[in-house]
Image (cartoon, rainbow, N blue to C red):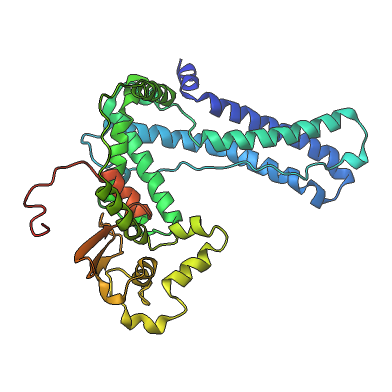
């Protein structure tokens, strides 16, 4: 009874990968024993490497399953809804199988048909198993066998998954501080929000069912509606948007916009716009909070809108604790003050977008701006 229960908890993809890796080991041993007497070790080395990776994958499936079970029980049995990552050690190891294109060893020493077929089957299996492993991930057991319809467990599970994935992605982008932080920060807040969004898993619904429902809702919302009156935008508002659009675009002082303008030489264009080659002119530029030593962000902004240095009065380009970048410009010719708030450009901006919500501005919020 316990054996049947354990089999039901295993994912079908994990069963397929386990059997496929076992077949790779068996076929690889047969080919190695057949080819080694007549071939050098360098010719048989790809086969031995694939054998080692397959055995490593098989040996890691058991500890990964144990870690999954311990993680699930920790989330279910936790008395309070606190951050689970502080008490869990995620030992999910992703062991990828890589295909090799030089596995035609031993063919010159024999002309038997079965050996040719074995080598062809071995190469195909290596490619297929490696591709399937990339899409299925490292999970061995089914989480539904532990969580069933517990809403809180699913929320905490996906909160941990999103938190771990976002920190790894930010670390790959050079934001190493998010990988070592222990307190609740903006990454944790976004992960908590995303965990709440996938609470439909508690009702037994899958991701494809959610996407199908969203597609039906979008199709319903795109139904043609009869509009009695279509108001045209005032010409002065359109002209104002055209006049202030360069300031909004200039706020992106990083290399993001240069990638679209100069796909090949975007790095050179960005360094030129930052004024890296003329650092001696840094004292003529205003100092922004978070700007680099040669004040490149201030120079890039002013160069794009073609304004003198005294037009830029204040600004911030650093990205900490959901503080967006902004620039304050004084235009004397039209007697106006332009405040440019940059949109999404950095990974921190994505976190800010995930935490943003709609709110109404009161008179106290805009006091002094009118």
Quadrant in the rendering for residue 282? bottom left
The foreground one among 135 and 331 is: 331
Residue 187 in sight from this viewpoint: no
**What's the residue at 46%, 55% (across, down)?**
172
Q: Seen in the image, is 277 located left or right of residue 235?
A: right
Q: Visible in this render: residue 357?
A: yes
Image position, residue 153 (x, y; %): 30, 30
Left or right, 321 with reference to 89 = left
Seen at 34% across and 40% down, the residue is 160
> Is residue 53 shown left or right of residue 366?
right
Q: Quadrant of residue 206?
A: top left
Identify the residue shown where x is 70% and y is 32%: 125
Between 285 and 89, the one lying in front of the other is 285
- 9 relative to 349, above or below: above
Q: Position of residue 56 (x, y in %)?
A: 60, 41
In this view, the residue in front, 292 or 117, is 292
């Amino acid at each position: 009874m316990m054996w049947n229960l354990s089999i039901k908890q295993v994912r079908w993809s994990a069963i397929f990968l386990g059997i496929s890796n076992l077949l790779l080991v068996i076929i690889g041993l047969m080919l190695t024993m057949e080819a080694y007497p007549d071939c050098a070790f360098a010719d048989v080395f790809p086969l031995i490497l694939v054998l080692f990776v397959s055995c490593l994958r098989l040996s890691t499936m058991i500890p990964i399953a144990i870690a999954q079970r311990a993680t699930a029980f920790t989330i279910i049995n936790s008395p309070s809804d606190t951050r689970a990552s502080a008490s869990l050690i995620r030992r999910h190891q992703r062991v990828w199988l890589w295909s090799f294109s030089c596995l035609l060893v031993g063919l010159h020493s024999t002309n038997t048909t079965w050996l040719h077929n074995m080598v062809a089957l071995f190469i195909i299996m290596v490619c297929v198993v490696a591709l399937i492993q990339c899409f299925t991930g490292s999970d061995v057991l089914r989480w539904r066998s532990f969580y069933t319809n517990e809403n809180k467990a699913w929320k905490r599970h996906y909160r941990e998954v999103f938190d771990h994935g976002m920190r790894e992605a930010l670390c790959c982008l050079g934001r190493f501080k998010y990988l070592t932080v222990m307190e609740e920060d903006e990454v944790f807040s976004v992960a908590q929000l995303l965990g709440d969004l996938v609470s439909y898993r508690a009702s037994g619904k899958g991701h494809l069912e959610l996407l199908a429902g969203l597609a039906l809702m979008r199709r319903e919302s795109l139904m043609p509606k009869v509009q009695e009156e279509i108001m045209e935008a005032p010409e002065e508002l359109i002209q104002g948007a055209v006049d202030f659009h360069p300031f909004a675009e200039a706020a992106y002082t990083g290399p993001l916009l240069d990638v679209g303008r100069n796909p090949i030489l975007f790095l050179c264009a960005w360094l030129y716009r930052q004024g890296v080659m003329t650092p001696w002119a840094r004292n003529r530029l205003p100092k922004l909070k978070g700007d680099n030593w040669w004040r490149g962000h201030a120079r890039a902004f002013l160069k794009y809108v073609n304004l003198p240095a005294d037009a830029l009065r204040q600004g911030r380009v650093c990205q900490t604790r959901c503080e967006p970048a902004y620039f304050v410009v004084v235009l004397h010719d039209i007697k106006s003050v332009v405040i440019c708030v940059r949109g999404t450009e950095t990974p921190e901006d994505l976190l800010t977008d995930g935490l943003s919500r709609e709110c109404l501005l009161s008179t106290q919020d805009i006091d002094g701006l009118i």
